[in-house]
Image (spheres, rainbow, N blue to C red):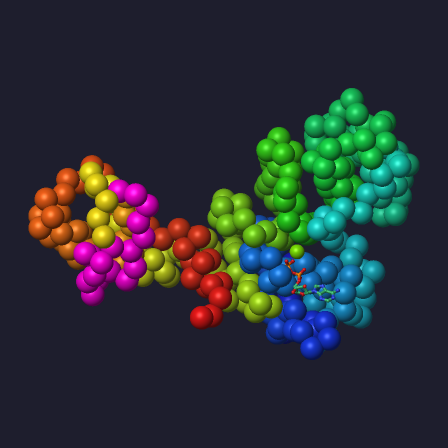
Amino acid sequence: MPAIVAEGLTKRFGDFVAVDNVSFEVPEKQFFGLLGPNGAGKTTTIRMLTGVLRPEEGKVFIMGVDMDRDPLKAKSSLGVIPEVGNVYPDLTARENLEMFGRFYGLTRRTRSERAAALLEELGLGGREDEPIKRFSKGMKQRVSIGCAIIHEPKLIFLDEPTEGLDVHSRRMIVDKVKRMNKAGSTVVLTTHNIEEANQLCDRVCIVNRGNVVALDTPSNLRSTFEGARSVEVLFDRPVECSEFSDQCITRVEEKGNKMRFYTSDPDEAIRKVMKVRGEKGLTILELNTLAPSLEDVFVKLTEAPQ
Ligand SMILES: Nc1ncnc2c1ncn2[C@@H]1O[C@H](COP(=O)(O)OP(=O)(O)O)[C@@H](O)[C@H]1O
Ligand SMILES: [Mg+2]
């Protein structure tokens, strides 16, 4: 049974369709990414999946439980780290975690033991008893994560969890989520950071303007875009892009003496480069062929129509 089934989810705000008939399944134990530019509909999708927002059309099943029919049961197996933290600034870190533990019905002893262990693991040891309004953004986010996982959910949703955080907090959060995934939790992460999705996710769903535009493993997404392969050449001096116009070269980018030729046929592109080199008496200082990056795929799929 999949951990999540989203079937034809649609959400409008007035006339504006924020999420348009989005469907996907997430198998148990998968690290799943929702990747898209700002405004793509990631947060709205997460809010529907976690029962905060009711879809106008479509259905959500969490571990086989219909979110609309039995929201309490569906929500009991998930932990959510929302885009805007929902921790209490006047409480201490420990009090925040323990309070969430109480919401989830943990015994006093369990919640106090788990809170202590999590605070240590999240690098907040020694600061547990300070009100979190004094904490940095990264520390608050770590408290927010502790609160979301104190009941040890099998399914974790994180909405841009590392956005705007310091490197140290980011690393701690990423490592903790990776460990939970290794230990068997299903993770859904939204991000507009392509490299983050590429590194962390087993499968990535690219969304744009409320629509799913691609859904696959990062490596499959890269390899379906053969046309995004490129040859990068460093010359000893600048050359006009127009010198390289050729059927086999789809686009040329230049940055000083370095030029990047996009092609589906690197061999032909290199022949053309060598021909221009001979004609113009250029020297090649470096030459690399590059596989398409997930960034190329993302840009291609989400670029604004002309
Ligand atoms: N409560 C709301 N009222 C009106 N428009 C909204 C509301 N929430 C989101 N939107 C709009 O829906 C679109 C998708 O938003 P969101 O899901 O937050 O995108 P993302 O998380 O991918 O950046 C955006 O254009 C946003 O302005
Ligand atoms: Mg968002």
Residue 265, horizontal then vertical, whole percent: 22, 58
**Callout count:** 0
Residue at image x 78%, y 57%?
75
Residue at image x 21%, y 48%?
239
Position of residue 260 in the picture relative to residue 204 (left or right) = left
Q: Nearer the viewer, residue 86 or 178?
A: 86
Location of the N terminus (image quadrant): bottom right
Asked whether 236 falls inside the magenta stretch, the response is no
Residue 137, horizontal then vertical, whole percent: 72, 37
Does any portion of residue 203 appear in the rendered image?
Answer: yes
Question: Residue 57's quadrant in the figure?
Answer: bottom right
Position of residue 118 in the picture relative to residue 212 (left or right) = right
Asked whether 248 falls inside the magenta stretch, the response is yes
Which residue reaches farthest top? 126
Q: What are the residue bounds of the magenta stretch?
A: 241-257
- The answer to whether residue 118 is above or below residue 16 is above
Question: Residue 250's quadrant in the figure?
Answer: bottom left
Residue 124, horizontal then vertical, whole percent: 74, 28
Q: Nearer the viewer, residue 200 or 269?
A: 269
Position of residue 76 in the picture relative to residue 251 (left or right) = right
Q: Nearer the viewer, residue 285 or 255?
A: 255
Question: Residue 242's quadrant in the figure?
Answer: bottom left
Residue 263, horizontal then vertical, whole percent: 27, 58
Residue at image x 72%, y 72%?
13
Does any portion of residue 27 appear in the rendered image?
Answer: no
Position of residue 103 in the picture relative to residue 148 (left or right) = right
Residue at image x 52%, y 55%?
203
- Ligand 1 lies in quarter: bottom right
